[in-house]
């Protein structure tokens, strides 16, 4: 067998090994390797879901309110939306209240919306 043929066989075998390894560990590079990083990413997703739930609760309350009457949005609305839309079974009431306060202040709701998020402050 010529040296070129041996080199060609080695290149083909190396490629086959790399393809088999890629098929075996497909998607592994996307997942975080460190548990601390995994917890940080899970926390970021939780905060993002609560923020979105609070924004949806404020928007929904404003759209349901009649003309001239204040919109009423509660912490329980945020907890319910986090469960229904994002699948969080347990949401801390303090976290939901903080997200609602943030959304309330960011949207400028003081004039036309009432909330119980501020009564949840300990």
Image (cartoon, grey):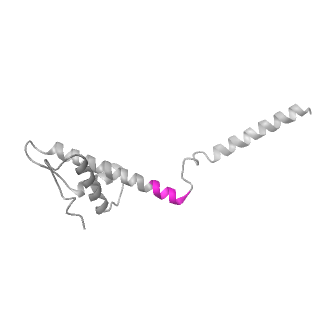
**Residue at point 24% right, 64% down?**
121
- Report which quarter residue 75 is drawn in: bottom left
Please state the horizontal and vertical placement of residue 58, each as a whole percent of the image: 22, 48
- Which quarter of the rendered picture does the N terminus lie within? top right
Residue drawn at x 58%, y 47% is 29
Q: Kindly report the secondary structure that dominates the magenta region of the rendered protein.
A: helix
Q: Quadrant of residue 115?
A: bottom left
Task: Point out the stretch of residues depicted in magenta.
Answer: 34-41
In the image shown, does 59 or 90 lie closer to the viewer? 59
Q: Is residue 94 above or below residue 70?
A: below
| Relative vertical location of residue 2 with respect to residue 57 in this rendering, above or below | above
> In the rendered view, does 55 fall on the left or right side of 2?
left
Frontmost residue, 13 versus 30? 30
Q: Position of residue 83 (x, y in %)?
A: 32, 54
* Outermost bottom residue: 122
Considering the image in quadrants, where does the C terminus appear?
Answer: bottom left
Magenta span includes 38: yes
Q: Is residue 27 magenta?
A: no
- Outermost left residue: 68
Furthest-right residue in this view: 1
Query: Which residue does the image show at 79% across and 36% down from the upper left?
Result: 11
Left or right side of 104 for 37: right
| In the displayed structure image, the side of residue 113 where residue 23 appears, left or right | right
Camera-nearest residue between 114 and 79: 114
Residue at 25% x, 55% y is 101
Residue 35: percent from the left, percent from the top? 53, 60
């Amino acid at each position: 067998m010529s040296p070129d043929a041996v080199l060609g066989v080695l290149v083909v075998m190396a490629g086959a090994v790399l393809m088999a390894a890629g098929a075996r560990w497909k998607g592994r590079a996307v997942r975080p390797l460190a548990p601390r990083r995994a917890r940080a990413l899970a926390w970021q997703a939780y905060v993002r879901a609560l923020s979105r739930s609070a924004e949806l609760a404020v928007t929904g309350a404003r759209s349901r309110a009649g003309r001239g009457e204040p919109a009423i949005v509660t912490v329980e609305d945020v907890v319910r939306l986090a469960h229904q839309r994002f699948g969080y079974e347990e949401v801390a009431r303090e976290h939901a209240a903080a997200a609602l306060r943030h959304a309330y202040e960011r949207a400028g709701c003081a004039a036309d919306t009432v909330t119980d998020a501020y009564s949840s402050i300990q």
